[in-house]
Image (tube, rainbow, N blue to C red):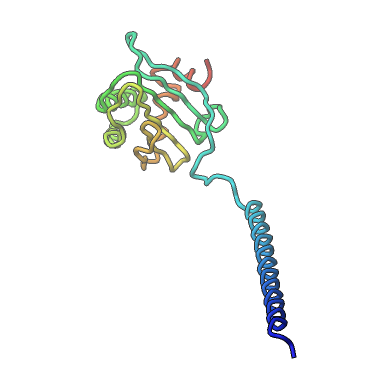
């Protein structure tokens, strides 16, 4: 008959074998899980579409810049951006960024814009409609403020104030008529236009 010590030793060895087996199985399962996860991550990275949504334009490139002055007073600096750094009429996306060098009330900005539309010969009814939009779209600006007009597509345009979304334009005709103030061949500031579109 086996002694009590021998029986205990047998029991310990049997228990150790079971523990070793369990650890081995758990370790194998963990290795398999890590392997499967690494493969799935690799496949996901290969199949993921890294292109931006159509509504989000790629990084734009500067086309040109110009400054507006009146009677020795600097009013603003304007910079035009496009997808390839070139300006082509009706080619989008397009961004016009204006940095102001003096404080201007929104009402004065709107009046100056209306004057430019009148110069371009826009119908009075359309100008009045646009004025109503600008009353909602434009704040008073202080020296150093930036007002940016971003036209991402034919149906998506917005104003940004100090680089933050501020007002979404819903009138599909507005973007072209607004940009025409600077970019039309009939603009009241042809030299400024040439600098903006990179013709200087």
Residue 177 shows in the view: no
Dividing the picture into quarters, in which one does residue 28 lie? bottom right
Q: Position of residue 105 (x, y in %)?
A: 25, 25
Residue at 37% across / 35% down in the picture?
159
Q: Residue at the far right: name it.
A: 1
Q: Residue at x 38, y 36 (%)?
A: 164
Residue at figure coordinates x 75%, y 91% from the top left: 1
Q: Horizontal placement of 54 versus 162: left or right?
A: right
Q: Is residue 124 among what the camera can see?
A: yes
Q: Nearer the viewer, residue 193 or 165?
A: 165
Residue furthest out toward the top = 72
161 or 191: nearer the eye? Answer: 161
Residue 8: x %, y % from top left? 68, 81
Residue 121, picture quadrant: top left
Q: Nearer the viewer, residue 157 or 38?
A: 38
Q: Position of residue 192 (x, y in %)?
A: 44, 17
Q: Is residue 154 left or right of residue 129?
A: right
Q: Where is 54 relative to 98, above or below?
A: below
* In the displayed structure image, the side of residue 103 where residue 99 appears, left or right: right
In the rendered picture of this protein, how many numbered marks are placed on residues?
Answer: 0
Q: Hey, which quadrant is residue 24 in on the image?
A: bottom right
In this view, 59 is above or below 190: below
Q: Give residue 154's position: percent from left, percent from top.
A: 46, 41
At horizontal 36% and vertical 32% (from top left) the residue drawn is: 161
Residue 67 to residue 29: above or below: above
């Amino acid at each position: 008959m086996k002694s009590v010590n021998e029986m205990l030793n047998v029991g310990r060895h049997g228990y150790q074998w079971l523990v070793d087996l369990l650890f081995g199985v758990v370790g194998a399962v963990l290795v398999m899980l890590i392997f499967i996860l690494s493969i799935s991550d690799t496949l996901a990275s290969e199949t993921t579409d890294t292109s931006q949504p159509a509504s989000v334009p790629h990084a734009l490139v500067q086309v040109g810049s110009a400054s507006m002055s009146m009677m020795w007073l600097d009013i603003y600096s304007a910079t035009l951006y496009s997808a390839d750094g070139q300006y082509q009429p009706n080619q989008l996306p397009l961004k016009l960024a204006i940095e102001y060098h003096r404080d201007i009330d929104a009402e004065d900005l709107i009046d100056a814009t209306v004057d430019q539309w009148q110069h371009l010969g826009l119908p009075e009814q359309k100008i009045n409609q646009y004025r109503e939009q600008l009353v909602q779209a434009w704040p008073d600006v202080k020296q150093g403020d930036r007002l940016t007009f971003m036209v991402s597509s034919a149906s998506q345009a917005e104003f940004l104030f100090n680089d933050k979304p501020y007002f979404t334009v819903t009138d599909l005709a507005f973007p072209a008529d607004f940009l025409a103030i600077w970019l039309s061949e009939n603009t009241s500031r042809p030299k400024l236009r040439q600098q903006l579109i990179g013709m200087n």
